Amino acid sequence: MKKEAKLLFCLIWISMLLISCDSQDASVTITSTPGSSPQVEFTTAPYIADYITMTYSQYATTDDNGAIKTQILSYEPDTKEMKKVFEFDYTAQYPLGFYDKSNERVYYTQRVDTEKDYGDQIFVRDLAEGTSIQLTESLFAVNYMIPSGNQLFFVANVKGEQAIRLGAIDLNTNAMTLWGDEDMLVEAITLDLMNQKIYVSAYSLEQRNYSQTHQDGPAGQNNFKMPTYTVYETDYDLKEKTKLFSKNYWIRMLMNTDGHVYAFCDKEYNKGQDPSTVVDYDIAMKTTNETKWGTVRLQRGEANYSSDGNKIYAIAIVKNKRGLHEYNVQSNTFTALFTPEDGFINNIQVVRGNH
Amino acid sequence: MKAGKSMKYITVGLSAFILLSSNVVTVNATEIFTSGVPKIDLETIKFQIPTSLEPGAILTYDVEQEPTITYDTSAVDHATIKSKPNLLQAEVPDIEGRAAEDEFFKTVAESVKNLPVTDLGYDLPEPSPGTVVIYGSDGHINRIYQDENIGSKQAIVAADIPTSTVPYPGRLPAGTYTYGSGQKVIISAGAVTGEGRFTVFRAGVGGSGTVGSSNKVLGAGDVATKRQIDNAVHGTPITARALDTNIVKTVYKNDIGSLPDAVLDNYFWGWNNVQFGYTYSDILSFSGRYYYQF
């Protein structure tokens, strides 16, 4: 091949590479020395595999009455590597932390007292710089924190309300947006990072209060009428409020994988002996399919699919050991990943990597 | 709405308490109670909060940290309130379900029998000016709080707030946790059970649950669990049973508290309504147990 044609071919090849790559992820360096073909160095954003961020509480000392700390742990299924990312004082009502590996940050909650009141607030810490910033002032108790892009999505009780709200914090401006209204109690969420959607299980405070005050008689049965739980879809702006389906089940946990949202439900509260019901919502078809979860109970504290959809990571008790397990969907088997005896896994979040 | 009493005075700062706005009786160090409760030594109490006093007693430490004892009259005060009829259904005892629930509690206890039993003791703060202790209808402690009209907030010893300087076990390894006058909370791999005293709280009393004092908004059916042991998500549904009446209810955890001598603190359900088989008073306490699963 003539020299000019070779060069042209290289330039065309380089152009094609540039077009096909996400400009945010890739950079190209071309070096050229006289008399030789251009050399191309192609660098991409660091590959992040699936990992599970966990909130874990353990005694800080060997003394059973010693101070305890809440830890944020990170487990990577590919490498089976477990690391302790951050440790902070246990002061919040519910131990909650989240490791954002791609930005090397952690989010965590701490009780903050003011002149007139108190509440658990969200903090963010830059792990490289070692500095923490308080992001909120108006929350009372926080149940979820999941970052995506420039936002931190959370589920919390806001001071002055009885509701439990889904909200978002713009990490550039610190502005907070809330979804829904004061009659809403958000029970669970799951994020579809690819499509930038959030799926929410929520029910009505008014309905809960009615059920709560009318749960008597007749004898011999549970007379508490389960409120209607609805799964909604919303967008990252928290403007959308599309109702997907409703059930008179306790929709206590949501998972998602390619084109599907899975709702884990119980027909009664605190009846874990009965198998859960799984409602599989097909996003494209807008249909639901209900089945019984025929194996070990997946506990509250979150669960979700791996990137490839073949595994579910969850907190479960298998062979009398409670901890983080990997459930293989095809073979219907559980593998224990982390079953500590010294501490307690409070909650987990599956963070799907950038494959 | 005030009950007639032969001896009464209004203590300084009384207006700050809705609870103490009615007529009260003070007791000096030498008075002996006719109920059979031993003579109270106020000198001892000055430096140490007693773990029990006469039912319904309200122990207040004044600016000099001198203890005074008054008595709750909230139930009597509100007995004449019949602003609207009780529209709720009558509660029905759940006797049939008791046996199955007993079995469940036994199973949970059995699953942790080889695990440590941690006794947290009473874990009471030292009294300071403004400390107020409310004793329940059984004479045990219902609530400890700081009256900011008497003593500054900074004087609060953090019995309510675990900090890194105050060693506090949290809800950690599975096991059995005992405290107070016989409270027991068990954490197993799949559930939390609590058995002991149920107490009550109301907005405006002891700084609890008030929009404004804490910005918390609570209602009937909301409960607080003991923060040092129990830290479920906000809004966790809990199954609770009053053991003497066998009334079972679903309640929701929406608060946490120090609960020095109780397993569950139940928010005010109204003066007219009965819950768990009991009429509300600010010093109500009764035997109960609760559970929830993961």
Image (spheres, rainbow, N blue to C red):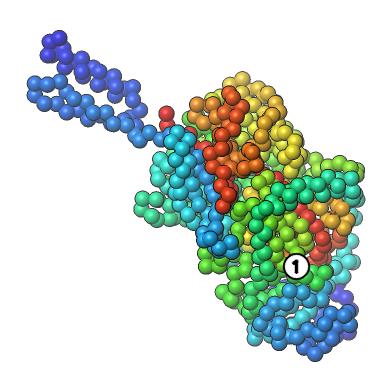
Q: Which residue is mark 1?
A: B181
Q: Is residue A256 left or right of residue A352?
A: right
**Callout 1: few (<14), some (14-19), or many (20+) C-alpha neighbours within 10 Å?**
some
Residue positioned 68% across, 83% down in the render: B46
Residue positioned 62% across, 66% down in the render: B160
The type of residue carrying mark 1 is: Ser
For residue A38, above or below residue A327: above
Camera-nearest residue between B83 and A299: A299
Q: Is residue A355 left or right of residue B261?
A: left
Camera-nearest residue between B107 and A294: B107
Image coordinates for residue B134, horizontal then vertical, percent: 75, 72
For residue A300, above or below residue B252: above
Image coordinates for residue A8, horizontal then vertical, percent: 18, 15
Image coordinates for residue B77, horizontal then vertical, percent: 85, 70
Image coordinates for residue B285, horizontal then vertical, percent: 80, 64
In what element is the residue under mark 1?
loop
Residue positioned 70% across, 48% down in the render: B111
The extreme top residue here reads: A1
Camera-nearest residue between B176 and A29: B176
For residue A269, above or below residue B31: above
- Can residue B179 be seen by looking at this rendering? yes
